[in-house]
């Protein structure tokens, strides 16, 4: 059946399909849709029909005779904007012509195409994607005659991150560096020079990066009263989705645009503000009633996703946050099982339990794709991924790659591969390429010379590199240091010690200089040391990882997986926001794992970690499992006994049931090929 649409023109007073709003919405949603004139804050709890409410609000305004061109709908993704516009069209059976909708960047670009000259650009300015911006930074660095490798300065990619975070959050380069990359503080003056050169180069080249689309948009509104007045008068109704995720720059823009009619409706949930590492500022939503003194505050507290028992636990947890709006989610679903707390000996036992319980749930008729395992940090899934591969349970990593396929893990393993099989050329090329002055060409020459002499021991002789030019020779010297540190034959029985020495002899410094999320990657590598501790042979360790990674049914990029494919979903909690599953396992709920160790001494960070726990719990529709290891191996301290996560300690014990699980110790020899 083909649905017929009329064209909704911008003629005032146009009216389309009658909608019984009171019948189709719950009382909370109905009140927002019909009464959110003026400044309005909609606190939309998890699973409360936020998108539905926004769609009906837009439809209501149009049916009240508001011209489409007088409505601005701002979302965080193009997909969300298209989804809302499509749903409005389906609801009204009409196509609103002239409504402004899209992401902040999309609307900023649209505005600047008209008024670019007012901010020093031509209207046909080019837009730099992320790689273009990095390449332009490289040009600036070269023009300034700065030697990044020699000085161990951050890479252009990290410099771009510093600039972007500074601009979006209204911070100086110095403050951002201190906050995110304190080990680069010595280079703040140089970073400022690069930043100034980058700004100048963009202007002379008539190009903007993504951040400029917002920076120049705000500048346009703040420095040109007539232009600001034009847009502020045009947008009689402004609606902003996911307001808890806005940064300072975005909040400033909305404030400027709403200056005339004051009809600004922002929708969000402070309890789900979890992206401060991207620059999101929870104070934007918390301070909304202060910035707009006459603001109405609406609450969507009816949850359509989870059972009462799951919501009771989530509500109890988030109550411990001080900086928040008071709200209490309640559900329309019937009663279910209480969430379960499972405490297991170690991460291996944790992995075995999840795999076994997943198979049991599958036998009960729950598809794998309706089950998710959520974790605070990627490294916490290493043992689980190996266990799933062992049991041939297909899985995906949502929004990421498998633990052992990550670039930094493969970097470390490349050194290990040289020890086990010195004739593996790709391992030489990868490991050598991490050292200054050695590109693919010299790496290949070094490997060819090794083949010629056929001895790894002779490679360690300083005279081996005499054929290299000075820069490559210096880089090879640092490579040789690592190989020398790990080539003791006795170490072949200690793969954990090999990985540890690779970290300590230069690779950790390499990570800090080359990766913007260095702390997380270093945590991953330290977990690799802990993981390797269980193996009695470096050869078996490497063999096991390689074999398991080649199995059919292993994970792949989540966004490349067919939605109909029945695979278990593994995800960080950040990647899981906005999604839901029948059953959710939240793992690693032990001290130092979750909340993350970096948040321990900062109350604001603890509150964001608690919001992460809240988000994780509210992804579950029917069953929620809270799982934690009691001990873990740490290569610096040995076996460590861990307390419960703070978030478990805080919970009312009547809100969950504790399961006693009979554990069977995993024997590596049962599933790996021995020498």
Image (cartoon, rainbow, N blue to C red):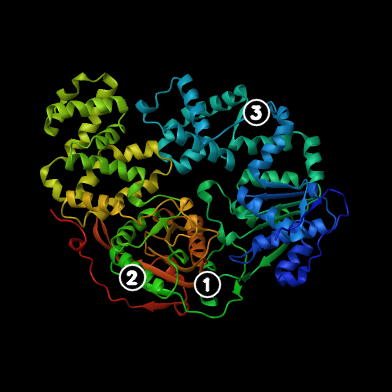
Mark 1: give few (<14), some (14-19) or many (20+) Cα within 10 Å: some
| Nearer the camera: disc 1 or disc 3 | 3
Q: Secondary structure at mark 2?
A: helix
Using the image, tell me which numbered label, if any, was put on residue 125. 3
Whether residue 509 is visible here, answered yes or no, is yes
Q: Is residue 194 above or below residue 639?
A: above
For mark 3, give the secondary structure.
loop
Residue found at the very far front of the displayed protein: 1
Q: Residue at x 24, y 28 (%)?
A: 476
Rounded to the nearest whole Å, what is the CA distance between mark 3 and mark 2? Answer: 57 Å
Q: Earlier in the sequence, mark 2 or mark 1?
A: 1
Q: Is residue 334 left or right of residue 260?
A: left
Residue contact at pointers 3 and 2, CB within 8 angstroms: no
Label 3: few (<14), some (14–19) or many (≥20) C-alpha neighbours in 10 Å: some
Residue matched to label 1: 316
Q: Is residue 294 visible?
A: no
User: Horizontal and vertical percent for residue 659?
Assistant: 36, 77
Q: Nearer the viewer, residue 620 or 211?
A: 620
Give residue 356's mark: 2
Question: Farthest residue toward the right?
Answer: 13
Q: Answer with left or right where residue 220 lies relative to residue 635.
A: right
Marks 3 and 2: which is nearer the front? Answer: 2
Q: Is 328 left, or right, of 494 in this rendering? A: right
Gap in angstroms between the C-alphas marked 2 and 1: 29 Å
Q: Secondary structure at mark 1?
A: helix
The span from disc 1 to disc 3 (Cα, nearest Å) is 51 Å
- Residue 573 percent location from the top left of the image: 47, 58
Q: Is residue 590 above or below residue 597?
A: below
């Amino acid at each position: 059946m083909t649905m017929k649409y009329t064209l909704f023109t911008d003629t005032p007073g146009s009216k389309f399909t009658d909608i019984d709003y009171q019948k189709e919405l719950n009382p909370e949603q109905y009140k927002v849709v019909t009464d959110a004139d003026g400044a309005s804050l909609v606190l939309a709890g998890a699973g409360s029909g936020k998108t539905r409410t926004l769609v009906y609000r837009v439809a209501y305004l149009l049916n009240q005779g508001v011209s489409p061109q007088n409505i601005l709908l701002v979302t965080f993704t193009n997909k969300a904007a298209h989804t809302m516009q499509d749903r409005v069209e389906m609801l009204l059976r009409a196509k609103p012509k002239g409504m402004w909708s899209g992401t902040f960047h999309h609307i900023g670009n649209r505005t600047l195409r008209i008024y670019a000259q007012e901010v020093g650009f031509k209207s046909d300015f080019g837009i730099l994607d992320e790689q273009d911006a990095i390449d332009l930074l490289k040009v600036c660095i070269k023009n300034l005659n700065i030697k990044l490798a020699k000085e161990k300065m951050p890479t252009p990619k990290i410099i771009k991150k510093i600039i972007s975070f500074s601009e979006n959050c209204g911070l100086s380069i110095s403050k951002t560096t201190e906050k995110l990359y304190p080990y680069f503080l010595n280079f703040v003056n140089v970073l400022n020079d690069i930043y100034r050169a980058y700004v100048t180069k963009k202007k002379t080249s008539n190009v903007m990066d993504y951040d400029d689309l917002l920076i120049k948009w705000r500048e346009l509104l703040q420095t040109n009263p007539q232009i600001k007045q034009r847009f502020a008068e045009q947008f009689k109704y402004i609606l902003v989705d996911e307001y808890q995720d806005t940064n300072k720059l975005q909040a400033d823009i909305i404030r400027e645009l709403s200056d005339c009619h004051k009809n600004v409706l922002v929708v969000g949930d402070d309890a789900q503000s979890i992206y401060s590492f991207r620059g999101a500022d929870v104070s934007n939503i918390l301070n909304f009633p202060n910035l707009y003194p006459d603001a109405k505050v609406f609450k969507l507290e009816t949850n359509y996703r989870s059972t009462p028992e799951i919501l009771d636990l989530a509500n109890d947890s988030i109550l411990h946050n001080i900086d928040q709006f008071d709200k209490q989610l309640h559900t329309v679903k019937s009663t279910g099982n209480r969430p379960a707390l499972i405490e297991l000996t170690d991460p291996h036992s944790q992995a075995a339990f999840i795999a076994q319980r997943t198979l049991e749930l599958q036998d009960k008729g729950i598809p794998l794709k309706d089950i998710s395992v959520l974790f605070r940090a990627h490294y916490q899934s290493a043992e689980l991924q190996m266990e799933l591969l062992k049991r041939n349970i297909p899985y995906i990593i949502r929004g990421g790659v498998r633990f052992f396929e990550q670039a930094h893990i493969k970097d470390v393993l490349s050194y290990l591969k040289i020890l086990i099989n010195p004739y593996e050329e790709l391992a030489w090329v990868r490991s050598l390429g991490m050292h200054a002055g050695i590109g693919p060409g010299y790496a290949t020459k070094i490997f060819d010379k090794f083949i010629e002499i056929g001895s790894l021991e002779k490679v360690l002789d300083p005279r081996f590199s005499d054929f290299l030019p000075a820069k490559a020779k210096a880089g090879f010297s640092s490579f040789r240091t690592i190989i020398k540190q790990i080539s003791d034959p006795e170490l072949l029985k200690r793969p954990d010690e090999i990985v540890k020495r690779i970290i300590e002899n230069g690779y950790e410094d390499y990570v800090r200089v080359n990766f913007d999320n260095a702390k997380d990657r270093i945590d991953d590598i330290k977990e690799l040391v802990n993981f390797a501790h269980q193996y009695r042979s470096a050869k078996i360790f490497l063999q096991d990882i390689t074999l398991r990674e080649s199995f059919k049914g292993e994970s792949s990029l989540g966004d490349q997986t067919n939605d109909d494919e029945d695979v278990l979903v593994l995800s960080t909690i950040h990647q899981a926001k906005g999604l839901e599953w029948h059953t959710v396992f939240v793992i690693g709920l032990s001290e130092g794992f979750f909340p993350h160790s970096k948040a321990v001494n900062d109350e604001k960070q603890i509150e964001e970690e608690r919001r992460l726990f809240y988000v994780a719990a509210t992804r579950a529709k029917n069953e929620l499992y809270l799982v934690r290891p009691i001990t873990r191996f740490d290569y610096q301290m040995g076996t460590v006994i861990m307390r419960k996560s703070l978030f478990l300690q805080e919970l009312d014990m009547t809100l969950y049931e504790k399961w006693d699980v009979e554990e069977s110790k995993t024997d590596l020899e049962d599933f790996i090929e021995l020498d």
